[in-house]
Amino acid sequence: MWYILKNITKKESESEFVEFLKKQYGSDTEVNIYELNKTTRIIFTNHGIHKHISISNHKREVREIEIHFVLEKIMKLKDEPIQRWKSDKGIIHLHNTQKVEK
């Protein structure tokens, strides 16, 4: 299956939500919103060593292959450990904290 990943962060309808997230996490937080094949929505936040992704699809369950695709293409992770959980509403959350060398 081919995936089309589109960054929709700059869409006017998303700007209020992006500003809300930046207020929650801090103005230095990177916030991007993506669509994957028009039905899967991805919200990516990156604040320093912490990266978080929320993946949802309002038509069906999020597929495992979509999760792996997002990990590689957006989070730039392959074998690094992540925390993963599913909310009551079916949203998949992925969290990675990079190790800081002393």
Image (cartoon, rainbow, N blue to C red):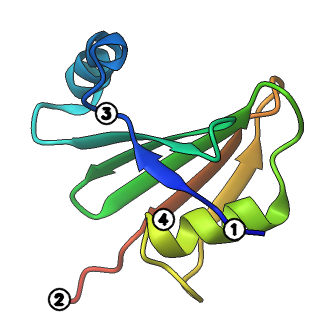
Q: Position of residue 29 (x, y in %)?
A: 20, 42
For the C terminus, which image quadrant?
A: bottom left
Q: Which residue is painted at 35% across and 18% down in the image?
A: 14
Query: Residue 45: where, in percent of width, then height?
Result: 36, 45
Label 2 SS: loop
Q: Quadrant of the N terminus?
A: bottom right
Residue tagged 4? 96
Give the CA distance from mark 3 to mark 1: 22 Å
Crowding at label 4, few (<14), some or many (≥20) Cα neighbours within 10 Å? some
Question: At x 64% / y 62%, what residue is drawn?
Answer: 3
Residue 38, x across and y down, in percent: 62, 37
Which amino acid type is marked by label 4? Asn
* Kind of element beneath mark 4: strand
Q: Residue at x 52, y 49 (%)?
A: 53
- Which numbered dot is residue 9? 3
Label 3 SS: loop
In this view, which residue lies farthest toward the left? 28
Q: Nearer the viewer, mark 1 or mark 2?
A: 1
How far apart are the alpha carbons under marks 1 and 4? 26 Å
> Residue under circle 2?
102
| Distance between mark 3 and mark 4 Cα atoms | 21 Å
Amino acid type shown at disc 1: Trp
Residue 32 is tagged as none
Which amino acid type is marked by label 2? Lys
Horizontal arrangement in the rendering, residue 74 relative to residue 72 (left or right): left
* Nearest the eye: 35 or 29: 35
Earlier in the chain: of badge 2 and badge 4, it is 4
Which residue is disc 1 drawn over?
Answer: 2
User: Which is nearer the N-term, disc 1 or disc 4?
Assistant: 1
